[in-house]
């Protein structure tokens, strides 16, 4: 009897270059499924969005992050707050 998955699955169709698929398949072990590997890669990408790099942040996000830090002096916080509260 086949074990039932606790998560619902859906089939999708994507188009990728043939060589990329061949390279990807070479990374799989003989008992690893393509679907499971792709699912784990997507999940890892979604999890990493919360910890995205500084380069990915907008200028306003960077200023807001600086304003919330404890090691930023009060004058800098005041200036950042002025910039952040002004409409674009």
Image (cartoon, rainbow, N blue to C red):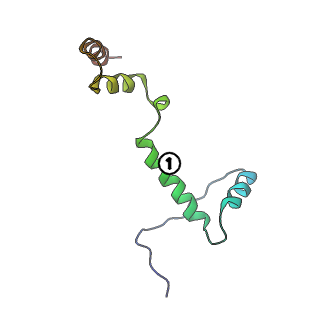
Question: Quick check: 10 left or right of 65?
Answer: right
Name the residue beneath numbered marker 1: 45
Q: Quadrant of the C terminus?
A: top left
Q: Helix, strand or loop at disc 1?
A: helix
Q: Quadrant of residue 70?
A: top left
How far across and how far down the image is residue 37, in percent? 57, 61
Residue 73 lies, with reference to residue 20, above or below; the image says: above
How far across and how far down the image is residue 78, in percent? 25, 14
Q: Residue at x 50, y 48 (%)?
A: 45
How far across and how far down the image is residue 82, in percent? 27, 13
In the depicted view, which residue is nearer to us: 18 or 59? 59
How far across and how far down the image is residue 29, in percent? 65, 67
Q: Residue at x 49, y 88 (%)?
A: 1
Q: Residue at x 72, y 55 (%)?
A: 23
The residue at the far bottom in this view is 1
Question: Quick check: 23 left or right of 43?
Answer: right
In the depicted view, which residue is nearer to us: 88 or 2? 2
Q: Residue at x 49, y 51 (%)?
A: 44
Question: Quick check: 14 left or right of 43?
Answer: right
Residue 51 lies, with reference to residue 82, above or below; the image says: below
Count up the numbered dots: 1
The residue at the far right in this view is 19
Q: Residues within 10 Å of mark 1 (few under 14, many from 20)?
A: few
């Amino acid at each position: 009897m086949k074990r039932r998955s606790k998560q619902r699955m859906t089939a999708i169709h994507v188009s990728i270059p043939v060589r990329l698929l061949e390279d990807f398949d070479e990374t799989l072990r003989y008992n690893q499924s393509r679907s499971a590997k792709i699912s784990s890669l997507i999940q890892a990408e979604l999890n990493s969005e919360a910890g995205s790099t500084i380069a990915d942040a907008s200028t306003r996000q960077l200023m807001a992050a600086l304003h919330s830090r404890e090691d930023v002096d009060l004058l800098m916080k005041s200036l950042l707050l002025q910039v952040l509260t002004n409409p674009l």
